[in-house]
Structures are given as C-alpha cells and as structure tokens.
C-alpha cells in the first residue's frame, strides 16, 4: 500500500520528481520508522541529525518525494522537521530558511506586522 | 496527518484561487520567483499548510509576513488555536502590572474573535483560551467560540476562563448548558478542559455520553458540580481530573481504561469502579488528608498505582499516619507543612510502607525554627530501592536537614539527592514570590549538607 507508487516510479523512466539520491533516503525510511516508532527520543535524535546533515533545499526535495510516493508517515515526519526548524525564529530567519525574498511593497509589510503585533512576542534572536 | 497531493507541472492551488480578495495577485507555484533558492516554492499550498499547522498560533500568524504567497496560508491551519494569556493574568494578580481587568478582557476577546474570523481551514486540532472572561459581557462571544470549535471538529477544547481573586465573588462565570450543546456534534472531542466554567453533573453526563472518543476530562473550579454519575461505561477515558469543585458530593464512574486520576477537593463519595490500568494518582486538599488519617478508607486502586502525589499541606497531623504497604509504588511526591516533628515521622512512615519506591520527592512549605541539634532517626530496615530523593523548598531548618540526613543514612541504594531551594509552588507560578533571602539561606545550608553526602551519591543543588 505504501509503495504502489514506487513501482510506478521505477517503471516511469521520464520521472523528474524524484531523483535517485532522494529515493535512497526516503525508501529506507519505513524500516527506520517501524524500528523507531516506539521510541520517541530516538526519533528526536534522528530528526536532529537529519536537520544537521540536510540543507533546507534537500528537505524540500525529500518532502516532494514523499508526497509523490504517497508516503504519509515520511511526509509527516519531514513537515514536522521543518516546523521544528522554524519554531520561535524571527521572520528573517524563516525567510532565509525557505529561501524567500519579501515581495511586499514597503509600507505593506509594516502594516502586516502591526496587524499581527500579538504574534511577534517572545521570538528568538537569530 | 499531512495530506499528500499530486503535483502536476504548472500546478495552481485551488486554495489561493478561491479565497483571495479580488485585487490580490495570484502566484503560480513554479513561475514568479526567479530565485533558485526558493525550492519551497515548488511545494503545493496544502503541504505548506501542513507545516504551518504544526507550529503555534503565533508562529503561524507570523508567516503571513514572509511573502505574498504566505500571506493567507496560515489561516488554513488545522493545528492549534492557542490563546493563552495566563502570564498577563498572573502579572495583574500579583500587581506586577496595573492593567484594568475589563480593558484586558476586552482586548483578549477581540483578539480571539479577529483570528476566528480569519480562519478558513475546515478543521482544527485544538482550541484553547486562557484568560479571565466573564459571562456578563462576553456570553455570546464564549458561545461563538464553542460553536466555532465544534463546527471545526475540534479535538482538544480548553476553556480556562480563570477567575481571579478579585473577580471571583463579583463577576458571574460562564455557565455551560446542555441546551446549548444539543445543537452541535460533540463527537470530535478527545480532550475537554473546563476551568471556572460553571457546569453541572447533568451537563457533564450529557457530554460524556455524546463524546465516544473522549480521553481526557478535566473540570476545575465549578460550584455547580454536585453529583456526577454517567450512565454508561467510558471505555476511552484515560485521564480524569477534578480540581477544586468544592460542592461535589457524589461521583461514580466506570472507566475501565483509566490511566491517571487527580482529585483536589473536599471529602466526597468517589467511586472509580474497576480501573485495572491505573498508573498515576494525585490528591490534594481535604481529601488527601482524609486518606492519610483514615488509612482504612484508602481506595483499593491506590495500591496499584506506580506514581502517587499527596498534598497534605492543609493540615498538621497529630498522630503519625500508619500507611498500609504500597507494593507498586515507584514514585511518590509528598507536600507537607514543615512544622514540628510530624513531617519527618510522616516521611519515615510512608517510606516504610513503600519498599520498592525509586523516587521520593518532598515539598516543604512553611518551615519554622532555626536548626537546633540535629537528630537522625535510624531504622531497622533501611530502604533498599530508593535511588532518587528530591527536597523542594529547602531552607536548612531543623526539619529539612533532619529529613535529608535521614534519607542519606537510610537509603542504601541512593544515587542522587536533589536539594531545591526554590519555592515549592514556583512551578505553578511564573516566578518566586518569596523573600530572596530564603533562597540564600537555603543555599548556604545546602552546602553544609553537601559535606555529609557520601561520594557515591550525586548531589544536585537548585
């Protein structure tokens, strides 16, 4: 059930969505998952390791791969990793993480910050 | 759970399309940004929303400032809508800031209403409000919030309309009625926490019979709760807490899978029935004291628990309580008034009754007297299993020094002793309200104590 799309992937040679490197990371995951499922601490450690070794860009590729392969647990896991990475961080940090540039008009962003002033309390320094 | 979505080239999110205001530019996933770094841009909206649903409400709202594409994504969050302003409430209670309750309640209610208006996701995991909100001015708002949450199939609903010391007598608290609840489906609920919401036993019984998946129920500070006897079994209920419902007289449930139980209140008729899986119990106020003075009244399931917490600070004991044997007890927390010799005897008695205890935490409130001559009681059968001992509220008076020395000499397997000079109630409050000299004295005396700690035992000073 988890791997109905994997077969499809291997059959479909013109596949751009999942490069080989990513596949080698995503596919061993279910085994890892089953082993670690019971133990939350190990999962956290694995997560931390992943964060350190994997650049945000890689992470997006992983997410896309997991999404394409219809692999819910991996998708959840990667999304959580991203969520933890941006936890309590400033807007600038998060922008850098996602590789975004602000495309707001000069006054617009300030207006937004004011509107959501309540959400800016208690943020980490970068 | 994140939804997987098939990504086609040139994919355009229906979310952004359907709900934007007309003059907002639509962003296509793969086009607008020429920056090679914006790989997250390739992700479909649904996945970004999944990510945003995993962070707190404040963090989610902040993402609106990241870029145009992110502006409204957070409003689709299916995670937690957490409006917890309890810190401000504490600051006001303890006069650290002088704000008007009515102004702050206004501001709080407006904040919640604004966010709820913006919210577009079909479901939410959690809805939590923690602030002083009274019925007189905000009844319709509160009902709107409940209606909103239930319509969004909320799983965890927390209404902590914390009364304050001033307002409790004057301002009416919101009353939850079953007439109100009858119009909505309750079956999404897995957690329900009500604090300072007036709710009767009948209403709770209605809730329990209509929430087949309820696992956590916590009811605090309601005077309307007198009798609670749900008619059917509650097989999903795992955690039950009844706190400071001082008019409760009768409480009888059948919750076969109950794992933890907490009751802080007066003596009442409390029957939990068969609870073979119970692991943890916690008692405070009169009821806790009555357990200790009438050991024959101890409910049988308490002999099963592994973790027990007893707050006995309400009373000074005349006789040393004699506890029956707790074979399964591994972790015990006792809160005691440290006056006279009773606390020490109480501790020794309970240690003797818990031969397999591994961790023992003692919180001492109100210590009197400087240390005179220290006596150490020696017992015939030293404790074989105790490995961690923690003493909170340590001041270095006679009582706590003797207690620490008693443990040091009688717990032969002791590995770690933690001396915490901070206010034992500090974990419930946000700071230590006591005279700062108390911590200094405690620390100085703890250093003296350190000289009597054997080398195999780790001493941690907090």
Image (spheres, coloured by chain):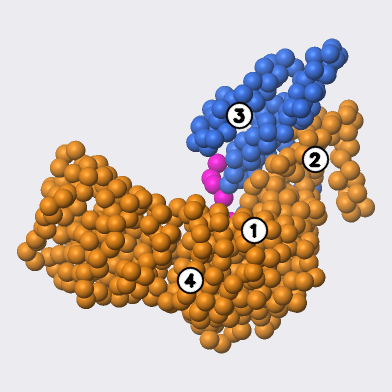
Query: Could you say where residue B366 lies in the image, as x and y percent from the top left?
Result: 26, 71
Question: Crowding at label 1, few (<14), some or many (≥20) Cα neighbours within 10 Å?
Answer: many
Identity of the residue drawn at 12% across and 52% down: B380
What is the distance, in whole Å, between disc 1 and disc 3 at their CAs?
Answer: 28 Å
Disc 2 is placed on an element classified as helix
Query: Could you say where residue B334 lies in the image, as x and y percent from the top left?
Result: 32, 62
Nearest to N terminus: mark 1 or mark 4? 1
Question: Which quadrant holds residue B361?
Answer: bottom left
Label 2 sits on residue: B45
Label 1 sits on residue: B214
- Check if mark 1 and mark 4 are on a common chain: yes
Outermost residue toward the left in this view = B373
Disc 4 is placed on an element classified as strand
Label 3 sits on residue: A33
Label 4 sits on residue: B270
Residue B391 visible in the picture: no
Quarter of the figure that contains the N terminus of chain A: top right
Of the two numbered discs 2 and 1 in the rendering, the one whose residue sits closer to the viewer: 1
Q: Is the magenta stretch mostly helix, strand or loop?
A: loop
Disc 3 is placed on an element classified as helix
What is the distance, in whole Å, between disc 2 and disc 3 at their CAs?
Answer: 26 Å
Of the two numbered discs 1 and 4 in the rendering, the one whose residue sits closer to the viewer: 4
What is the distance, in whole Å, between disc 2 and disc 1 at their CAs?
Answer: 32 Å
């Amino acid at each position: 059930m988890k791997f109905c799309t994997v077969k499809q992937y291997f059959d479909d040679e013109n596949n751009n969505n999942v490069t080989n490197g990513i596949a080698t990371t995503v596919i061993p995951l279910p085994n890892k998952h089953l082993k670690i499922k019971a133990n939350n601490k190990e999962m956290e450690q694995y997560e931390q390791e992943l964060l350190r070794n994997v650049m945000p860009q890689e992470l997006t590729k992983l997410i896309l791969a997991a999404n394409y392969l219809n692999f819910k647990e991996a998708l959840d896991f990667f999304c959580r990793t991203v969520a933890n990475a941006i936890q309590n961080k400033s807007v600038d940090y998060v922008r850098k993480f996602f590789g975004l540039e602000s495309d707001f008009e000069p006054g617009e962003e300030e207006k937004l910050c004011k509107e959501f002033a309540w959400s800016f309390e208690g943020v980490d320094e970068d | 759970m994140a939804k997987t979505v098939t990504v086609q080239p040139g994919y355009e999110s229906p979310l952004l399309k359907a709900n934007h205001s007309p003059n907002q530019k639509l962003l296509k996933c793969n086009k607008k940004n020429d920056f090679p770094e914006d790989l997250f841009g390739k992700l479909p909206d649904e996945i970004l929303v999944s990510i945003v649903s995993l962070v707190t409400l404040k963090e989610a709202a902040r993402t609106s400032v990241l870029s145009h594409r992110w502006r409204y994504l957070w409003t689709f969050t299916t995670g937690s809508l957490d409006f917890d302003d309890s810190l401000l409430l504490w600051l006001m209670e303890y006069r650290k800031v002088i704000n008007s309750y009515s102004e702050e309640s206004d501001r709080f209610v407006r904040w919640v209403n604004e966010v709820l208006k913006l919210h577009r996701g079909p479901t939410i995991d959690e809805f939590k409000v923690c602030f002083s909100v009274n019925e007189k001015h905000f009844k319709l708002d509160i009902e709107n919030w409940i209606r909103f949450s239930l319509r969004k199939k909320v799983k965890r609903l927390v209404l902590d309309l914390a009364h304050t010391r001033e307002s409790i007598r004057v301002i009416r608290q919101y009353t939850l009625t079953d007439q109100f609840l009858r119009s909505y489906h309750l079956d999404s609920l897995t957690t329900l926490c009500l604090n300072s919401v007036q709710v009767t036993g009948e209403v709770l019984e209605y809730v329990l019979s209509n929430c087949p998946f309820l696992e956590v129920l916590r009811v605090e500070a309601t005077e309307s709760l007198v009798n609670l006897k749900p008619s059917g079994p509650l097989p999903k209920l795992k955690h039950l807490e009844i706190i400071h419902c001082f008019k409760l007289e009768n409480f009888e449930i059948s919750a076969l899978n109950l794992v933890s139980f907490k009751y802080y209140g007066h003596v009442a008729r409390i029957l939990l029935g068969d609870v073979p899986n119970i692991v943890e119990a916690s008692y405070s106020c009169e009821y806790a004291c009555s357990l200790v003075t009438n050991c024959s009244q101890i409910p049988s399931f308490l002999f099963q628990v592994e973790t027990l917490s007893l707050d006995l600070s309400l009373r000074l004991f005349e006789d040393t309580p004699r506890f029956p044997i707790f074979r399964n007890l591994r972790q015990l927390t006792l809160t005691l008034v440290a006056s006279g010799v009773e606390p020490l005897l109480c501790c020794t008695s309970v240690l003797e009754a818990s031969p397999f205890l591994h961790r023992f935490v003692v919180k001492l409130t109100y210590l009197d007297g400087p240390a005179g001559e220290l006596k150490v009681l020696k017992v015939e059968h030293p404790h074989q299993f105790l490995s961690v001992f923690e003493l909170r509220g340590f001041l270095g008076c006679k009582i706590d020094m003797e207690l620490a020395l008693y443990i040091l000499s009688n717990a032969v397997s002791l590995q770690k002793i933690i001396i915490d000079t901070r206010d034992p109630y500090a974990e419930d409050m946000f700071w230590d309200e006591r005279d700062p000299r108390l911590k200094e004295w405690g620390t100085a005396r703890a250093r003296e104590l350190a000289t009597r700690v054997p080398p195999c035992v780790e001493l941690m000073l907090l």
